[in-house]
Amino acid sequence: MPNHRHRHVAPPHLRFRHRRVSRLRRRPHLPQLGGFGLVLAVVGPGLLAGLSDDDPAGITTYSVLGATEGYRLLWVIAVSVAALIVYHELGARIGVSTGRGVMALVRQRLGRRTALAGLALLMLANFGTCAAEFAGVATAVAPLGIPPWIAAPVAAAAVGTLVLSGSFHRVEHVLLLLCAGFVTYVGACILADPDWGAAARGLVVPSLPGSREAWYLTVAAVGTTLAPWGLTFIQSTVVDKGLKREDLRAERIDVITGAVLTGIIGVFVAVSCAATIHAQGGTIEDAGDAAKALEPLAGNAASALFGAGLLGAGLLAAAVVPLASAYSVAETVGADARLDERWAEAPVFHAAYLAMLVPAALLVAIPGLPLLPVLVGSQALNAVLLLPLIVVMRRMGTDRELMGDTVLGPVGRVLTGLAIALIAACVVALGLLSVT
């Protein structure tokens, strides 16, 4: 009888692929389509990861940026979106090439302790962001007389039921429908009647921040656009959806579309506030203040559209951020991380989702809690935690043994390196601001 033990002695990347093939057989293959049909079959991870960045914390950051600085720092959003495309594409590339999420790869290649330390920092940032999502929901429904202690738990129950009781494709489709709510910000901006010429100059002509607050808002804008949880989410959902190497070209379209739409919404939000609040010399503390301020300056319709967009953004991100956290926790400890599996099949995944969702909602339900530091501060923390994450991702993307024929080429290496330099500059600026 032949000895088959030698089949277990294989290079790590080959063993990796064998496990991936076995895993994907449990999910029906995507239809064999070409052209636009393939894009429609693949679309989802890029759109969700991108548009979820326009969450209440992000809307607040963009609102304060426009209200405080006018049109002059719009270029920060444009540069951040360029970096978002680069690293969301890298996350999708690694996902289809390895069949593993970010934290699973960190655990395998850098060790369990490193993975656990990274997970702890990631969960800290994610919790602040998740609380900000529920704060946005509570702010959006406050004009209806609904207090936060009702709004936040009800929203948590709604998104928790959707995510934990549905299949991957049903959850994805419902969340994609929520993305349609972002069009309200376009309407609000048009009604605000901005100076489009000044807005265009602010987008393409860099102007350095002129104050400590402006530097802080710049860092926060980068952190809210290129969020760590978004990078882990896109890679994990690409894996959970069962995308393969041959799907990468179509997934790039999904990634670019999601990132560009993210930037467009962010710019419209900032421009709305620049055209009204900044022009009148006013100030705001959160996105709710922005919606209220738009009413006397741009009309009731603009205010209502802004508030409706905030509600949709909060519900979308309140579902996605705990989901990104659940993927990361399960990957770190080596547990199953798939939406199609029920509680008994993936208890760690489901428990991690609830462990992020429920406390964040309860925190927002506390009467009198000051939410602005949570909203903007969590985005600045995102920028700090982003730096080691993108360094690790770039290292993986340039590893030919891991990536095979999808390894980053010269252009990809340059672009990812420039993005690292951008984030490093933001982190250094934030550190200098903190000590001076």
Image: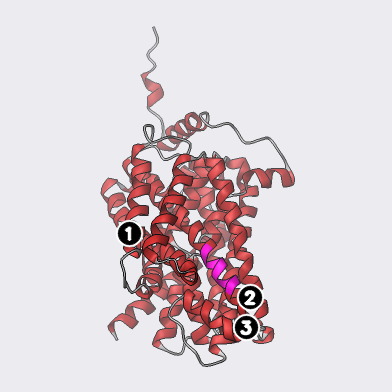
For badge 3, the amino acid type reads Ala
Task: Work out which quarter of the rendered image holds the C terminus and state it.
Answer: bottom left
Q: Quadrant of residue 72?
A: bottom right
Task: Indicate whether residue 61 is drawn in magenta.
Answer: no
For badge 1, the amino acid type reads Leu
Q: Nearer the viewer, residue 179 or 147?
A: 147
Q: Is residue 267 visible?
A: no
Other residues around mark 3 within 10 Å, as few (<14) / some (14–19) / many (≥20): many
Q: Are marks 3 and 2 in contact (CB under 8 Å)?
A: no
Q: Is residue 141 visible?
A: yes
Question: What residue sits right under mark 2 in the picture?
Answer: 301
Range of residues picked out in magenta: 304-311
Residue 298: which disc? 3
Q: Are marks 3 and 1 in contact (CB under 8 Å)?
A: no
Other residues around mark 2 within 10 Å, as few (<14) / some (14–19) / many (≥20): some
Task: Indicate whether residue 308 is drawn in magenta.
Answer: yes
Question: What residue sits right under mark 1 in the picture?
Answer: 362
C-alpha distance separating marks 3 and 1: 34 Å
Q: Is residue 303 above or below residue 234?
A: below
**Which residue is at 44% across, 79% downward?**
217
